[in-house]
Image (cartoon, helix red, strand yellow):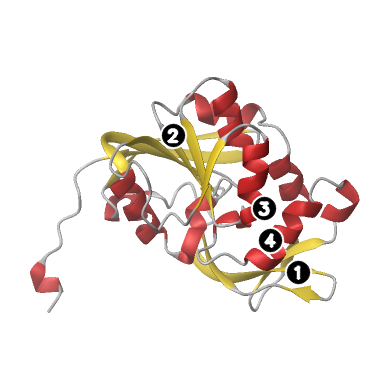
Amino acid sequence: MSLAIADPAPADLYDTALRSAGRPEERWRWFARYEGGPRHSLAGALGQWVGRADDADRHLLARARGAVLDAGCGPGRLVAELAAQGREAVGIDTSRVAIALTRALGAAAVRRSIFQPLPGEGGWDTVLLADGNIGIGGDPVALLTRCRDLLAPDGRVLAELDRPGTGLRSARVRLERGAERGSWFPWAHVGADAVAGPAAAAGLEVTATWEQDGRWFAALAAGERPVVRLDRMS
């Protein structure tokens, strides 16, 4: 999971985590705590976020087309890879440090939540939700609906998911390092076999799912916008 994109983001400890992520010995001090449940090490995730795009990343990006919006870009490895390929891409994130790190890689980035007004609304060819960023805000339907609004009529969402069998679940999560505790923020997990429902509710259609190097992904195409039945609003 990528913690860069909670809305609102726990920018206090998240910024600190990104600053320290370049030092491997520091990464092992960071954890994500689920409310009422276990905590998980962020060492591997932090290393991935500040590293270079890997084979699975590049395979994902090969499916992106046209103008790409990387939602929750974090330190910018994906938008930087797209920029290096000469492709049009912009990253957005709520973290000052994430935006600074992305720009330092030579990529374009804007400090903003995906739920705030954005440039090019209704004209993006691809919206990326990598590193589990379909969990932003804890409500996949709301997030995917927002992505649908950002897309061009023939656009697509490329989302990284949890493994099949995970289902669809929401939780509250916080960052921890030693005695330090971040703010709780909402997050969601969506399994590769559970994405069709939220996608359809948002006016998107699952056109492909795939696995590479132990990571799961889906392509969601913009389709008919869902019709709200007035009799269900009474």
The numbered mark, 2 or 1, whose residue comes first in the sequence reads: 2
Say what amino acid the circle numbered 2 marks.
Val
Whole-number angstrom distance, CA of label 2 to CA of label 4: 24 Å
Answer whether labels 2 and 1 touch (C-beta < 8 Å): no
Whole-number angstrom distance, CA of label 3 to CA of label 1: 18 Å
Q: Kindly indicate the quadrant of the structure image that contains residue 218.
A: top left
User: What x and y, as percent, mark residue 103?
Assistant: 62, 39
Element under disc 4: helix
Residue tagged 3: 97
Say what amino acid the circle numbered 4 marks.
Tyr
Q: Which mark is residue 68?
A: 2
- Image check: 15 left or right of 162? right
The numbered mark, 3 or 4, whose residue comes first in the sequence reads: 4
User: What x and y, as percent, mark residue 76?
Assistant: 62, 40
Rendered residue at 52%/42% (across/down): 91
- Closer to the camera: disc 2 or disc 3? 3
Say what amino acid the circle numbered 3 marks.
Val
Residue tagged 4: 14
User: What x and y, as percent, mark residue 108?
Assistant: 54, 37
